[in-house]
Image (tube, coloured by chain):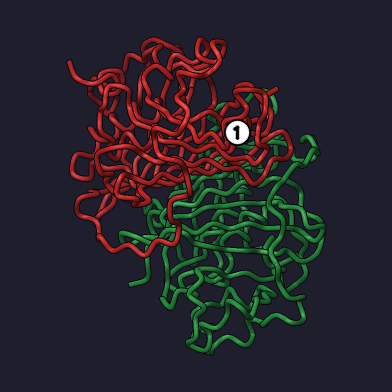
Chain colours: A green, B red
Amino acid sequence: MGFEFDRDSEVVDNGASTYSAQLSGGWLIGGGLNGGYQLAVIANALRAASPDRPDPVVMSAHFMAAAIEGEATIHTRMLREGGRLATLSAELIQNDTHCVSATATYGDAAAMSTDVATMAGPPDIPPVDACLSAELAPPGLRSAAPMLERLDLRLDPSYAGWARDQPSRSGVIQGWLRFADRREPDTRSLLFAVDALPPVTFDLGLPGWAPTIQLTAHVRAIPEPGWLLVRHATRNVAGGMFEEDCDIWDSSRRLVAQSRQLARLPR
Amino acid sequence: MGFEFDRDSEVVDNGASTYSAQLSGGWLIGGGLNGGYQLAVIANALRAASPDRPDPVVMSAHFMAAAIEGEATIHTRMLREGGRLATLSAELIQNDTHCVSATATYGDAAAMSTDVATMAGPPDIPPVDACLSAELAPPGLRSAAPMLERLDLRLDPSYAGWARDQPSRSGVIQGWLRFADRREPDTRSLLFAVDALPPVTFDLGLPGWAPTIQLTAHVRAIPEPGWLLVRHATRNVAGGMFEEDCDIWDSSRRLVAQSRQLARLPR
């Protein structure tokens, strides 16, 4: 049986560094499959292509066309390996359309130095039970986002007023995240988690889909089991685009992932 | 004659989407050529490959091996073009070594929407004449960094104590930047500017070269002529690596570029 996330991100090795996947409509959000879900599928192909260095350290991805439910092919290429790191590229192709171009540096997270001198502590946020479940989201939003059914997402009410047409206009969204079926986080699922929350533009009073142009994620540690604390913020909205930064802390309050994306403003 | 930056980043079209460049030792810093300089060379190849969309919007780059003075080849590939954006990949190869793998989304900056709703204002910093010129840097540092001769860099004294073995330990370096020969900034030179200052690890009391693993830069507007205000900060030092964020404001105080890199801590 397994967990939804693992089942839906499986890849089959077709030889010649090429893998196939059956992308699941369960991860739809707005007009296409969630970008983080696509990165998690790509990460399964890259892990297969880099068995000695199985963990993403940094993945950069350019999203060129929306992926939809159905078969996709992931072409991988080892660019350089040596020492503790390997760098690979991956292209996700669906129906002859080049949807995603990703490049990633992989390593062995369990063998990394355990020193921590982080300056970024987790933000103030109410406990899980005092946050707002996505089950309370407006029905129109939920029907456009079947992915929400796969998550247990509890949003900080201070930045969730947009659900009642009262956005805080801070450019922040934060909350507690885990999979609905209690699959525990790992280095691969962090690539999904950095792109799982609603776009910060909701909190700016701009509802609607905000397609990612480019996203780069750093995976900085193996997360402990339990809830992830996920914070998104934007500081630069201009030229029809916005930058969105994401930080993720695990249940031990360690900063385990960071990402930055450039996305288009909703129309 | 032209400016040093332009002369040293020229590429020659060899056909078949391949370009050659003569990398100049004038941009050495520590053990290799500056990463931002390499991005500027790559950007010349990509501009030639994408004449209708000549400006970088976002470039992601994985640095796999140090580049040195001498000939290099840049292989480009158009991944997708249509609408306002084009996405291309580029690989910088030198002496059969794959040094850089980059992917970039290009557009026409002059045709972009001019709306600005940015939240990130420029930081407090003393005026140019009250900042510290890199000419005051210790001779050992200057001889290891011929690139500094090509810049007029004025560092905020609040975060320049490392030059006297008194780092502020804030994880910040900021200053005013222009080219020594007064070449004005443009969208391409911003790709250089996001990686031109000393690493923030200097301010943490960790002198030494900090090789970039991956860097993603967003170019958000055409910069006005004059000084750039460049701020670097880190919030996550762990596992032998650190993240370094850069924001750049132009002389009109507009946020024109942002970048984030993941780099190795100095040994």
Residue A36 point in image, percent of width and height: 56, 59
Residue B264 point in image, percent of width and height: 64, 30
Classify A199 as above or below B49.
below
Image quadrant where residue A57 sits: top right
Residue A259 visible at all: yes
Classify A21 as above or below B175.
below
Residue B239 point in image, percent of width and height: 74, 37
Q: Residues within 10 Å of mark 1 (few under 14, many from 20)?
A: many
Side of A174 where A89 appears, left or right: left
How many numbered circles does the render carry?
A: 1
Image quadrant where residue A229 sits: bottom right
Residue at the spot x=81%, y=39% of the render?
A: A114
Residue at the spot x=32%, y=26% of the render?
A: B179
Classify A131 as above or below A107.
below
- Give the labeled residue for mark 1: B263
From this viewpoint, which residue is outermost toward the front?
Answer: B130
Side of B233 where B226 appears, left or right: left
Residue B168 point in image, percent of width and height: 65, 36
Q: Amino acid at mark 1?
A: Ala
Classify B64 as above or below B242.
above
